[in-house]
Image (spheres, coloured by chain):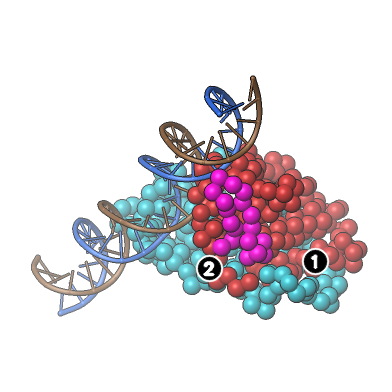
Chain colours: A red, B cyan, C blue, D brown
Amino acid sequence: MHRKEQLSATHEMYLKVLYRLGQQDDVARVKDMAKGLGVNPGTVSAVLKKLEQAELVHHDRYGSVTLTSDGMAVATCVIRRFDTIKALLTEVLGLDIETAEVDACMMEHAVSPATVNRMERMVSLVMAGKIDLSALENSPMPFDGGRCCDCETEGVCRAETEVESELHS
Amino acid sequence: MHRKEQLSATHEMYLKVLYRLGQQDDVARVKDMAKGLGVNPGTVSAVLKKLEQAELVHHDRYGSVTLTSDGMAVATCVIRRFDTIKALLTEVLGLDIETAEVDACMMEHAVSPATVNRMERMVSLVMAGKIDLSALENSPMPFDGGRCCDCETEGVCRAETEVESELHS
DNA sequence: GAATTTTGTTTGACACATCGAACTTTATTC
DNA sequence: GAATAAAGTTCGATGTGTCAAACAAAATTC
């Protein structure tokens, strides 16, 4: 995998959704991708064209869409990032699953390999009971008034524009 | 701070850079922002226009640029996110500062308030010595061959397109 | 197997963030 | 204070990701 030019977050999402669709149903359709991405079918057509040029998918006109092996490699990489971040947020930091999924879906496009590796390591040690996080459970939430981000109860404010489009999972 | 429509990552970056410039020099100039963002001055002019409409900055034509109080609130929020994520990556996960800064700069636009709060809590407990991470230091890196992301030694591969433009700090 | 419905594509438009180049203001220098 | 330099703005263009609407192909139904 020596893909020099970084893929956009968008392209990564398309590949991820495609991968997931391939897992549940056997074939993926434009319609399903559009639904999964919360996006217009016309948009999917357009993006698929680029993805095909990059040899990440192939797509029979009016037919099904599948990942190439390169596309598959990228997709599994993105999914690994997602899973790792989600696990970190839930298992280590104690966030609820919904918030964790929304955030992981945005963060998955922003982490370097080194970071993912460290996160993964942390998660596995915590889950193996080798790191004691009881201090975290008992500590109070940080709260000091004036900060715009202190709205833990509202939780998903940053994500709420995102929620209706079902990009995440 | 009830800002319903989410700001773009770009706008957040502009505000953050502006804040930092305001700290070191007293006045911020378009030139400085352009430099700090790795972007053309014309672009700064254009974006500033939007930011001014959103009442996040004011900008005297051909003159200096300053944050409004709303802009200041957003900027400090973004910076808090950056600092928190950076601290998590270095203090908790043990990443080097360079990688942590690059990643934090991308992730700062992708985390919900709830997540930042949890991260902050975690960081402060670790730094206060209330959580023992020695298991992490001694554990081997995850490595299982076929994965595209297993390139810890190259570290910043995902970020390297980003590095030359000095967006991060 | 013709009509209808569903699915997919194309087209034209838009917003965003960007550039480079032409132009305008402001600042500096002589 | 006129000439020059530096900083800022505007303009036209580009690429990306998106939409809605018009159109085309495939699938379903009768």
Indicate the chain on which mark 2 is placed: A
Please, what is the three-letter code of the amino acid marked with disc 1? Answer: Met
> Is residue A57 a member of the stretch shown in magenta?
yes
Foreground disc of the pair 1, 2: 2
Residue at x-position 64% and y-position 77%: B154
Residue C22 position (above or below residue A103): below
**Crowdedness of circle 2 by 10 Å Cα count: few (<14), some, many (20+)?**
few
Q: State the image coordinates of residue B36 (x, y, percent, origin top left).
A: 45, 66
Horizontal and vertical percent position of residue A16: 66, 54
Note whether residue A150 is visible: no
Pick the front one: B25 or B61: B61
Q: Position of residue B113 (x, y in %)?
A: 67, 49
Say yes or no: labels 1 and 2 on the same chain: yes
State the residue position of label 2.
A5
The disc labelled 2 sits on which kind of residue?
Answer: Glu
Q: C3 and B34: which one is in front?
A: C3
Answer yes or no: is residue A140 visible: yes
Residue A44 x %, y % = 55, 47
Instruction: Identify the residue shown where x is 41% and y is 47%.
Output: B50
Q: Secondary structure at mark 2?
A: loop
Q: Residue at position x 59%, y 61% from top? A: A56
Q: Quadrant of the N terminus of chain B?
A: top right
> Quick check: A119 left or right of B40?
right
Name the chain letter of the residue that bears numbered label 1.
A
Q: Secondary structure under badge 1?
A: helix
The residue beneath circle 1 is A122
Tell me the quarter of the image containing the C terminus of chain B. bottom right
From mark 1 to mark 2, how far is it between C-alphas? 29 Å
Q: Farthest right residue? A: A129
Residue B134 shown in magenta: no
**Residue numbers of the magenta segment:** A55-74
Nearer to me, B123 or D20 = D20
